[in-house]
Amino acid sequence: MKLYKTRENEIFYYHLKNGNKRFMYRYRYYDLLGKRKERKKSGFKSMKEAQRELIKLKASLLEKNLLQTDKYDLNVSQWIDVWYKTYSNNWAISTQEARKNTIEKHIKRLIGNIKLKDITKTIYINNFLNVLKEEGFKPHSISSMHATLSTALNAAVEDDILDRNRIRSAFIEKPKRLTNFLTPHELNMFLRYAKKEKTSDYTLILLLAYTGMRSGEAIGMYWEDIDFEENTVSVKRTRDTLGTRKPKTDNSIRTIKVDELVIKQLKKYRAWCMQRKLEFGEQLEEVDFVFLNNDGSMNYYKELLSIAIRRIYRNMKKDDIKINKITGHGLRHTHCTILLSQGNQVKTVADRLGNTPETIFETYSHSFEELEEQAVVSFSQSLQGGAVSGAEK
């Protein structure tokens, strides 16, 4: 049987007697005694199928501690590829994409050629963390990249490839205090100008501001997810450039009570959508996405929200009005900070946003600091009568 090389070193293809193409892998390695061995398997109908089985084999040999070459000579790039391909099927699509981007653009670029066993805290700080800072990456981004690599090294420890994770204690600068939100006064001004925007943009902005939904959750809503009798909207999916899928976490699946103002706008917007659909020879269905682009010709996409927000700020600038600049996600932060400033229970706010109380405490620490200051003032003011006069006697 004549074998032909593919673009993957260990994957080959051959032809059956009937002319059909098949693939096989041949994996050569040294065991812990230094003896050369080979594993091979043929009969795969596609190269991807052969690759998947080869990855499983490598992972199995790593788990059983059978590879001398992998155990002693594996570099960061080689290990993180095995780790990603082994575990990524258990991650959300957005997590897969984020980690893949970190691996390919940053980890492999900066420390991919360093042997896994040679990674020390000092090497990691100098060759990775400090370089990312010099390149202008923000603390939040660096923290996320660190978490990806640290998780991969933890897996190497669990598989007895490393004795311990030496980068775990590396100092990671904490993200700066949250600024991507508006005060109630600023939000009122922002919505006043948003109302001048096209109907799809305004309706989405109003919904995000009054519910704290993620933009992907709103863009992924069907009309059947809105209960006009009970004044609620339900989050059942999210949608972005990667497609439509389940929300970020189980907590994200929720039903949110909304203000009558929002319901009225949604009803008005629904009539607009029906008219636009008719113009294109279509009927509005309950399983249609709620948001259409501004001419009604197709479904709304996230970039339109960013464009609308930039236009709102330009229009305010023309009128010499200055407020804090936010992104689309800033409307979610705004909703949460306003609720917290009004003394709402953290669990209630977390449920509304589809988060955990722990995430609320971590993300919105500035709100709790302000609430603590308010509490001190309120307590002091409440005692300025009898307690203070009593203390002066």
Image (cartoon, grey):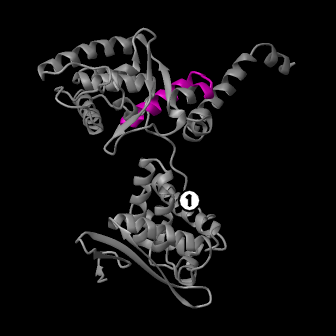
Q: Residue at x 31, y 22 (%)?
A: 203
- Give residue 5's quadrant in the image: bottom left
Pick whichever, 176 or 319, lies toward us.
Answer: 176
Q: Quarter of the image containing the N terminus?
A: bottom left
Q: Residue at x 62, y 64 (%)?
A: 168
Q: Residue at x 24, y 21 (%)?
A: 199
Pick whichever, 385 or 97, lies toward us.
Answer: 97
Q: Residue 188's spot in the image, x, y percent? A: 38, 21
Farthest residue toward the front? 17
Work out whether 154 lies above or below 181: below
Work out whether 110 lies above or below 322: below
The answer, for residue 326, to whether it is visible in the render is no
The answer, for residue 46, to whether it is visible in the render is yes
- Give residue 182's quadrant in the image: top left
Amino acid type, callout 1: Ile
* Magenta span of residues: 325-348
Farthest residue toward the top? 229
Work out whether 10 lies above or below 48: below
- For residue 36, side relative to residue 282 (left or right): right
Q: Residue at x 18, y 26 (%)?
A: 296
Pick whichever, 309 or 245, lies toward us.
Answer: 245
